[in-house]
Amino acid sequence: MEEFSQNVKIPDLWQQEAVGALCRGCDVVLHAPTGAGKTYVFELFYTRYFKGNAVYTVPTRALANDKFREWRALGWNVGIATGDYSFNTSAPLVVATLETQKSRILEGRCADLIVIDEYQLISDFRRGANYEVAVAAAGKDVQLLLLSGSVANRLEVAAWLERLGRRAVLVEHGERPVPLEEVFSEAILKGVSFKGMGFWGRLARKISSLEMTPLLIFAPKRIEAEIIASKIAEAFKNEPMLEIPRQKLSMAGRKLGGLLKRGVAFHHSGLSAHQRCDLVEDMAKSGRLKVVVATTGLGAGVNFSMRSVIVADGEYEALGKVYKLRPDELLQMYGRAGRRGLDKSGYAICLPSKPRFSEAKEIVLSRAKFLDWGAFLRIMDIAASEGKDHVLAAKNFAKRLFTEDKTDLGFESAKRNLSRQKLSLDGIRIEMQNSDFLWQRRTPTSTCALKDALFFDGKKWRNFLDVKKAVSLLKTGAVCELPSGGYGVEIRIASEISDGIFRLNKSLVSKLKPILKNEDRAAVSKSGATLKTLRRRFLKYLPDLFSGAFAEFLEIKNGGLFAKLSVRNCAAKTFKDGAGKNLFNPPMREVLVKNAYDFDALSGGGDFAGTASTVAELWLKFGLVDEHFKPTMRGRIFSLFNSGEGLAVAAALEDKSYGIGEIFYDIANLRAGARFGLSSKIRSPSSRLADICRIKYGICDIDGYLHKGIPAGYGEGASEIMRKIAGGASFADFEDEFLHKGDIERAHLEWLSIINHIAECPHLEDGRFLELKKMCESSSSKTNGKRIGTCIGAQGGAY
């Protein structure tokens, strides 16, 4: 895209092709690398040809704020909606995080054009269901523009839109505006002798001397980002310091301020929004920083490019779990290398045994592992209110998802099970002891590998392979200790018929005949075979003969050849408990149950979700639908939220002893995360909301909704902090070794986001819900509209 003046741009041919398709009323799936000019396609179409209302959705609040400020500076009439904050949302163009628009899309009152930037998030384990629903539920009168540079099966995405009855065009452009070159750190450091410096200091100094800065380093954790930044700043201590206004240094704080003067910064969610946006990102965009070290988790939300990029690790943490960076995430991170109009090439600098640029690839898009329950229940509720078949509405919507396979919600099996349960409400129920030593209903058997199974040894649950008694229950061979550790089984597989010659046992030979390949038949002949031949020709069949077992060790003794088999990969029938653990032969008991179908009467001492095998059965068991699968009030409240948050809010509202004012503050825990529970500044963390969830839904794991009975992002203690902040306390009052100002600011914004969301929810005929909604409306009107022109919000965020 050539520029011949400050304000006039000539679009490239691929950009013209995309705009032309949009002008014809088509949906467009646009594929182009980072920095190639995908956004300009929208800008050109919107400013010259489009006459309706548009919503431009982005993955994070930071990106939404960035676009909002950019277009507002051009004089555009633009609004913003990021959950925690909304302004001028009736404008012809609104920049938003996608989840803020989901309700409008489901209700058929969305904009004329919806742009979904980074639509590859359809595969995201946390937010993918929301992105899928946004596309599947959009009406035919709504035009779609999907943007990404990291989707391999983009043709399938265009075909999906066609299957939905839309006119879709795929426009592709594969050339990066700034070529990217893979460089190895060993080559850069060859011959370098900067004495007294560590690895990072030497590497940064050499990169600087080669004029390959500014450099962006992605680190897996915030503490590592700070350590790396400090080591690099120390290497530049003898160079002239940057002049930074006193006010900005005060805003930065001592640690970050000292680094900024050396032209170095760290960038993570522990920083305040002002520190990230107004200091680090602003100085990076203006080219004043040599090095920025950002956490891996913020990769998608970094709003600037640098000349060189390093990915320091291939893993990162999220929601208390460790995840490996996907190839498309690497592509996006390394794609930050090279500044358009400033650099002739960008550099992907690769460390030994760390992710390489050659490993960065486009993602093969697939739908998220779980269904968006809320969207389905909302569609069913709308259909029921209009006198339509709500079950049929749900089935029809399931056909619109991004999959060629049939999505079975399980209404029919749920009806059958419901009928059986109604025939006998009283009776004997078999319960099993779960991995938390609680009694729960016995679940249907499932199959798993023995390496993933647990066995109760009479005192505690242990890995199956670590318990001799457990392995003996397999009733195969003799239990033995394995060289690799743990227990396996030892079997006699052959007899020695002469010196060094062995003949396989007849029982094995008979089992081998149906699967034996011709070239291996000599190994099982009556004349026998050498040990070497048996190893090469026979051992490969052991997994088929013994359900996945393989030989770890062969031993000649007592005139025979014995194999010590590992059974770690062998399949076994187990029972999956509410925590998702596979239990082999758990303790059982029989219990006389009265009114077994009264799910509300169940306590949180066990998991009653585990007995459900379909989505519809889970809805029944969680009380989200009635026996006719019509959404209950609990289900209707739940359907207004994303993920498991609605389950918590609905459960809290049903407990009339739980004050609305308490709920108002306690919902701050829903997205706070585990970090808040570690704070030394919170003496009595609230747990009532979590307790109510476990009482209502059991101690269970449901992908996308609950972890041990509570929403996955739950963090006790945020409630107390929000109460004190509302009373006039500052964020800094609660900082400690676990909580930084940015963490508290993020939790506060997430709380505001939930409050604003409830304030904008539709009217429901439930007195306590309306009371909470009124309280949220009052709070929302006081906090919204006060942050124009500032950098708002944490990276990411569900709304």
Image: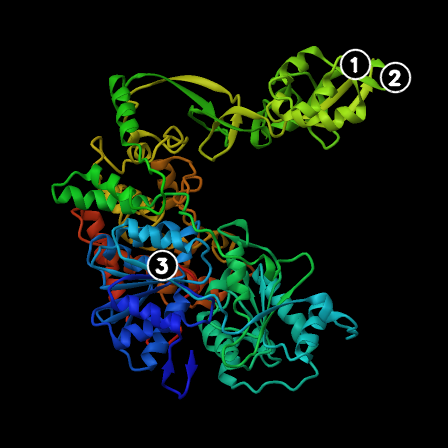
Figure quadrant of residue 354: bottom right
Q: Locate residue 627, reporting x and y percent.
A: 22, 30
Q: Nearer the viewer, residue 382 or 526?
A: 526
- Location of residue 546 with respect to 56 vertically, above or below: above
Residue visible at 51% across and 86% down? 245
Q: Is residue 656 visible?
A: no
Q: Locate residue 369, reporting x and y percent.
A: 41, 43
* Earlier residue among tags 1 and 2: 2
In the displayed structure image, the side of residue 591 where residue 774 appears, left or right: left
Figure quadrant of residue 6: bottom left
- Location of residue 653 with respect to 280 vertically, above or below: above
Q: Nearer the viewer, residue 129 or 585?
A: 129
Q: Locate residue 139, reporting x and y percent.
A: 22, 55
Q: Residues within 10 Å of mark 2 (few under 14, many from 20)?
A: few
Mark 2 highlights which residue? 499
Q: Residues within 10 Å of mark 3 (few under 14, many from 20)?
A: many
Kindly report the distance in space between the C-alpha atoms of the residues bearing marks 1 and 3: 78 Å
Q: Nearer the viewer, residue 342 or 3?
A: 3
Kindly report the distance in space between the C-alpha atoms of the residues bearing marks 3 and 2: 78 Å
Residue visible at 59% across and 55% down? 314
Mark 3 highlights which residue? 751
* Earlier residue among tags 3 and 2: 2
Residue visible at 42% across and 68% down? 730
Work out which residue is located at the far front of the displayed protein and give it: 518
Q: Locate residue 610, reporting x and y percent.
A: 40, 31
Work out which residue is located at the far top of the displayed protein and give it: 506
Q: Which kind of residue does numbered mark 1 sit on?
A: Ser
Q: Secondary structure at mark 3?
A: helix
Q: Which kind of residue does numbered mark 3 sit on?
A: Trp
Mark 1 highlights which residue? 527
Q: Secondary structure at mark 1?
A: loop
